[in-house]
Image (spheres, rainbow, N blue to C red):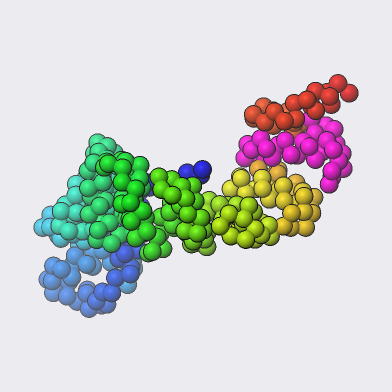
Amino acid sequence: MKLFIFLLPLFALVWGSLAMAQTQTDAATLTQLAEGGDLVAQDQLAERYYFGNGVKQDYKKSYELAKDLADKGYPCSQMVMGSLYYNGFVLGKNVKKAFEYFKSAAGNGSSVGQLFLGLMHYNGEGTAVNKTEAYKYLKLAADEGLAEAQFQVGSMSQRAEGTSKNVPEAIKYYRMAADQGHVDAQYALGLVYGMGQDTAQNMKEAIKYYRQAAEQGNPNAQYLLGLTYFFGEGVTKNAAEASRWFTLAAEQGDVDARYNLGVMYAKGEGVPRKKDEALKWFTLGAEQGDARCMYNLGYLYDTGDLIPQDVNEAVKWYRLAIKNGNLEGRDRLAELEKK
């Protein structure tokens, strides 16, 4: 089973994408209102300058607008101050102060503030690790519709982190995020159904979500979708289609996909039999430490199958494979070393 990264500090990325997507007053009108003393306009303009949304990005100007408004309870400005401290812009990095500003924003109803606060509680940034508090704030943000928070709540519910294990809830929140295009949630749902994780295996649903994540470029999903076509699990067996998905994953560094592609090119299964391609993918996999690829390189050089026989290269790769835990070539290596 392939594991996925659970939590990352997504601060500027998540908040920024939401801020950009909002339909807001044009920058010129907002600036005019702000200069006339409209505090709400100043609050929104602080966020605009932070991201460069309709105005030239200027962290210092963003800070100048936000510093007093944040203390007066304006959530956009509180998010600006928290992000400035978290990222170290203008004010220098201070995760404790960032935590306090995000906490204030969350208390004022900012769903993104709730998300950030949950992540900081989970990771122990600016505060002690507290999975229960993390789950509480992430769920608040999830119920406000934030896909990232929905994914995190799904994962915590599945893993019983900060809450009791609740697989139906995990699936519910994963699906909510997946329906918004959240690639990690799509991959997680694929695993739940494909591996039968805590629920009945359902390859039709697994393939649906693997495909969604794979089409967004997730290499793990691409690899697993390739496997379903290779073995004909839930779909008609199709080696050519398997090779297509393995190639996409392999090009992103997935070592299992590289190994499988090497085998397919060595055998001519789903792809033409090509020595250069087989060597390419086995070599790339071997360079990542994959002992199967090392053994296969040893075997090809040993047997002269597909490529010219080279005993020295065979010995080199067999030794490396054995050193890395693949013992298949042990007896053959002993024979070669006697010669």
Q: What's drawn in magenta, residue-wise?
A: 286-315
**Residue 244 % position (x, y):** 64, 59
Is 202 covered by the magenta stretch? no
User: Relative to 129, does residue 202 appear above or below in the rendering?
Assistant: below
Residue lying farthest to the top in this orientation: 338
Foreground of the two, 87 or 252: 252
Q: Is residue 56 above or below residue 124?
A: below
Residue 225 sits in quarter: bottom right
* Residue 312 makes an appearance in the image: yes
Is 175 rendered above or below residue 20? Answer: above
The answer to whether residue 292 is left or right of residue 173 is right
Residue 19 place in picture, x, y as percent:
30, 65
Left or right for 239, reference 145? right
The image quarter in which residue 46 lies: bottom left
Q: Position of residue 335 (x, y in %)?
A: 84, 24
Quarter holding the C terminus? top right
The residue at the point 40 percent across, 60 percent down is: 178
> Which residue is painted at 19% across and 54% down in the image?
106
Residue 185 in picture, x, y percent from top left: 41, 55
Residue drawn 47% across the image and 44% down it: 3
* Residue furthest front in the image: 200
For residue 122, side relative to residue 78 (left or right): right
Please say whether residue 291 is one of the residues in the magenta stretch. Answer: yes
Asked if residue 58 shows in the view, the reply is: no
